[in-house]
Amino acid sequence: MTTDQIFQQILKKRSFLCIGLDVDLKKISPHLLEEEDPIFAFNKAIIDATHNYCVAYKPNIAFYEAYGLKGWKALKKTIDYLNENHPNIFTIADAKRGDIGNTSTMYAKAFLKDLDFDSITVAPYMGKDSVEPFLTFENKYAILLALTSNKGAFDFQTLASNEKELYKHVLQTSTSWSNAERLMYVVGATKAEYFKEIREIVPNHFLLVPGVGAQGGSLEEVCTYGLNDKVGLLVNSSRGIIYASRDKNFAEASAEKARDLKNQMEAILQAY
């Protein structure tokens, strides 16, 4: 999928919503536990109910790894279901991989070729040779962790060297790597005041923005500083949507939450 295709979906749906599929069996509707594959049953119901309101889905891989082989099978069924039924929706493997070059090459093959995700989140700490293997697949993307939404982000990411914070070094340096046009960046919604300077460094790249909703980030503030000519934002909500209810009508409750966020986004786009 190209970034132009993502932009066209944003225009069509009047939404730049990404929904995180972070399945915790302790939080889903109890009746689903009777299913042969409760993880996939939950995901399918969420996708069927919300696909008209979002342009991306983001399974967090840890929530599948935690259930061993059953979790991996459910992940495969989920990505296959998305690719077969909603090929115009952007898919993100939230795996936060990144290792020496030959290892990253295998991670990239696993998620971008074998599982056929459109993108994968990648940790930048090991530098260029740990990221570039993810950038060798045409129309696939590495989403680099730049400035995250967790409290611990301040431990390292905002430390300054030569009067420039580390996250700015990451952004600036990464733009010189091979196939850097295939990079996107994770920037947390709880760091909205940083978006203006981030856009000065990467004005045209898409930003994946977690932290709206359960983590308290402001959609309006993110958009004030983060929107570009092609919107350039994929704003993620996970818990606030998928765990809206544990009743049997959980999917309808999730759809209502997704629709509310979509409507907020539509209003912002109309005013932009």
Image (tube, grey):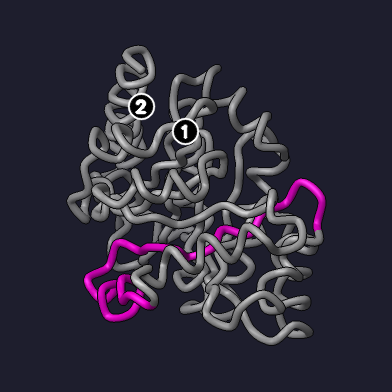
Number of residues whose C-alpha sits closer than 10 Å to that of mark 1, classed few (under 14), some (14–19) or many (20 or more): many
Task: State which region is magenta.
Answer: 137-161
Number of residues whose C-alpha sits closer than 10 Å to that of mark 2, classed few (under 14), some (14–19) or many (20 or more): many
Q: Secondary structure at mark 1?
A: loop
Q: Amino acid at mark 1?
A: Cys
- The quadrant in which residue 9 appears is top right
Disc 1 target residue? 54
Q: Residue at x 33, y 79 (%)?
A: 156
Q: Position of residue 21 (x, y in %)?
A: 45, 54
As rendered, which of 168 and 40 lies closer to the eye?
Answer: 168
Quadrant including the C terminus:
top left
Q: Is residue 139 magenta?
A: yes
> Where 6 falls versus 193 (above or below)?
above
Q: What is the residue that sits farthest to the top in this orientation? A: 270
Q: Does 8 sit left or right of 35 as displayed?
A: right
Would you say the residues marked 1 and 2 are in contact, meaning their CB atoms lie under 8 Å apart?
yes
Q: Position of residue 89 (x, y in %)?
A: 61, 36
